[in-house]
Amino acid sequence: MKVAILDDYFDTLRTLPCFSKLAGHDVTVFNDHLQETQALADRLKEFDAVVLFRERTKITGDLLDCLPGLKLISQRSGYPHVDLEACTRNGILLCSNMHSGTPSYAAAEHTFALILASARQIPAQMTSLRAGNWQMGVGKTLRGRTLGLYGYGRIGKTVAGYAKAFGMNVVFWASEGSRERARQDGENVATSRESFFAESDVVSLHLRLVPATRGIVTAEDFAAMKPGSILVNTSRAGLIREGALLEGLNAGRPGQAAIDVFDKEPVTDPDDPLVNHPNVVATPHIGFVTEDEYDLQFSDIFDQIVAYAEGAPINMINPEVWSETPRA
C-alpha cells in the first residue's frame, strides 16, 4: 500500500522500533503541516492510506470528497477531527484503537510536571538565576494541599496516584455517572461543583472535548477559586470558555495556570497573551510527546494498516464500509 504519514514534525517515527511494521509498504512521511484543503488533497491524491498524528490535521468532508482513491485512515484514540460521515460516504474505512483501560502515562506525567513547575516557580526561578538575580520568590509545598481533578478517566486517575504519593489530598468532580463510579471506587468526591473549585489548591482538567464539555469551565468557576490556586490543563483548551482563563488570571483567580493546550494551535505569536502571562507556565502541547508514547501509539496504528492490507481490518469505526467493499 502507498501510505502517507502526516505531521511528523521532527521525523521521529522512522527511529522507533514500531516503524519496521510497515516494511514492504511504500511509506512517505511528511514533516510539515498542511491544512488548506486543495493543497492537502493534491498531496494525498496518490495514497491508499493516511496515518494521522493525533489531531494535528483536520480531515474534513471537503478534503475526503477530493480523494476518491483513499481507502483507509489509521489513527489512535478519539476522532473529533475526522468527518466520520464523509469517510463512510466516500467508502473510506476509519480504524482507531480506542485503547480502553490504557492511560497515556506520558500525559499524566506531564500534568504532574506542570503542577510541580508552577508550584515551585521553576521557569521563573531559572530565568532569575540566568539573569544573575539568584532567587525570585517563594514557592509552595504540595504535601497537604488539595488537588481537584475534573474528570474521572484513565489519565485523571493516574494523576491522582502521583498526587497521593506526594501527600496531596485528592478530590474529584465529573459527570453524575463518573462521580458515582468514583464513590464506588472509594475516591473522595466534592459535595458540589462550587466547593470543588473553591476548596482545591490545584484544579486539573481531564475531560474529553465533546459538544457537552465544550466551554464547561467558566469565568464563574475561576471566580470561585482561591487567589493562590493553580489551574492545570493538559486536555483540551476548548474545555474552558474562550477568554475566561486570561480574564481569570488578570483578576487573580486562579492565581496561576499551567497549560499545554491552546484554543488555536500551533501558537506561533511570540506576543501571545497567555504564553507571556507572568503567572502562566506553558508548554507547546507536548503532554503525549515522548518516544515511549509514540512507539506505543504508532505500533497500534501500523498494526491497523498491516491488518487492512492482509484483508482482516481491526478497530473499525465504520465497519459498514468494509462490509460493502468489493473483494477480488
Image: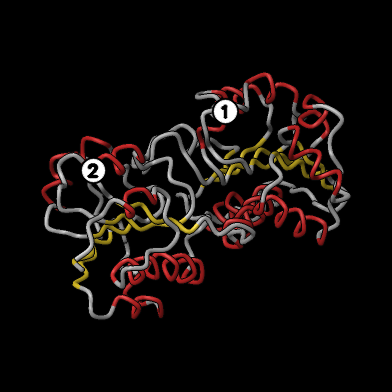
Residue topped by disc 2: 90
- Relative side of 122 to 293, left or right: right
Q: Residues within 10 Å of mark 1 (few under 14, many from 20)?
A: few
- Quarter of the image for residue 196 reads top right
Q: Residues within 10 Å of mark 2 (few under 14, many from 20)?
A: some
- Relative side of 201 to 300, left or right: right
- Quarter of the image for residue 204 reads top right
Q: Earlier in the sequence, mark 1 or mark 2?
A: 2
Q: Who's the residue at 30% across and 43% down the image?
A: 87
- Relative side of 105 to 152, left or right: left
Count of picture labels: 2
> On screen, 232 above or below 286?
above
Q: Who's the residue at 45% across and 67% down the image?
A: 300
- Residues under labels 1 and 2: Cα distance? 28 Å
Instruction: In this rendered view, identify the residue nearer to me: 225 or 281.
Output: 225
Q: Secondary structure at mark 2?
A: loop
Instruction: In this rendered view, identify the residue nearer to me: 43 or 205.
Output: 43
Percent position (x, y) of residue 99?
55, 59
Which numbered marker is on residue 212?
A: 1
Percent position (x, y) of residue 194?
79, 24
> On screen, 114 above or below 224?
below
Q: Who's the residue at 31% across and 73% down the image?
A: 310
Percent position (x, y) of residue 25?
22, 74
